[in-house]
Image (spheres, helix red, strand yellow):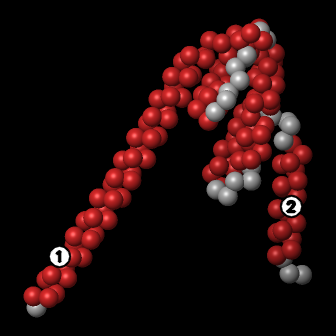
Amino acid sequence: MAMSIQVVYVLFGGLLLLLVCFLSYLLIQKARLNAFRAKVESYKDSMKESLFIYLYRKDEEHRVEPKNKIELAGVEELLSGFSAAVQGDEILNNITLYAEKVFTPKYKKELHHSRWSVRMNALYAIEDFGLTTLTDQLVEMYEKKIVQRLKKIKF
């Protein structure tokens, strides 16, 4: 009988330790995400005006070239906001041209990602920015999926 109580205490202690480890992991991940978001927001605030001027005037002096993930995320969020807020074919065309130059490699890679959500977010962004450079790749992926489905069907 005494042996079984000790086993219960050991199991309880082990589970408690496991829960503390999971909580620590989640807290660290949340802190990293919060730090990343803070850096993205700071970058967006510093580059908003330059990107806006570049898109409206095509002033190469104000062109923004993202160099890392933080800057890429910031520019993507700014462009998404601009494209939803502005009207006029010329500015939307400028947004599309800029997005094609900057985001085509990123979206091309994300279209082959193993997670469905990443692929869908890439498709939504391609649609939002009106990117046409990836049309051939999208058609190829679609046709490949149709062929795979047809192979599964037994006649």
- Residue 42 vertical position relative to residue 155 in the rendered view, above or below: above
**Is residue 2 shown left or right of residue 150?**
left
Please state the horizontal and vertical placement of residue 151, each as a whole percent of the image: 86, 74
Q: Amino acid at mark 1?
A: Tyr
Instruction: Name the N-terminal-most of marks 2 and 1.
Output: 1
Q: Nearer the viewer, residue 97 or 20?
A: 20
Residue at x-position 78% and y-position 45%: 108
Q: Is residue 21 left or right of residue 50?
A: left
Q: Quadrant of residue 62?
A: top right
Whether residue 96 is visible to the viewer of this picture, yes or no, is no
Numbered badge on residue 144: 2
Residue depicted at 65% across the width and 55% down the height: 116
Say which of 154 and 93 sits in front: 93
Q: Position of residue 42 (x, y in %)?
A: 51, 22
Q: Which residue position holds label 1? A: 9
Q: Which of 59/86 is in front?
A: 59
| Residue type highlighted by circle 2 | Lys
Relative to 49, say whether 126 is above or below. below
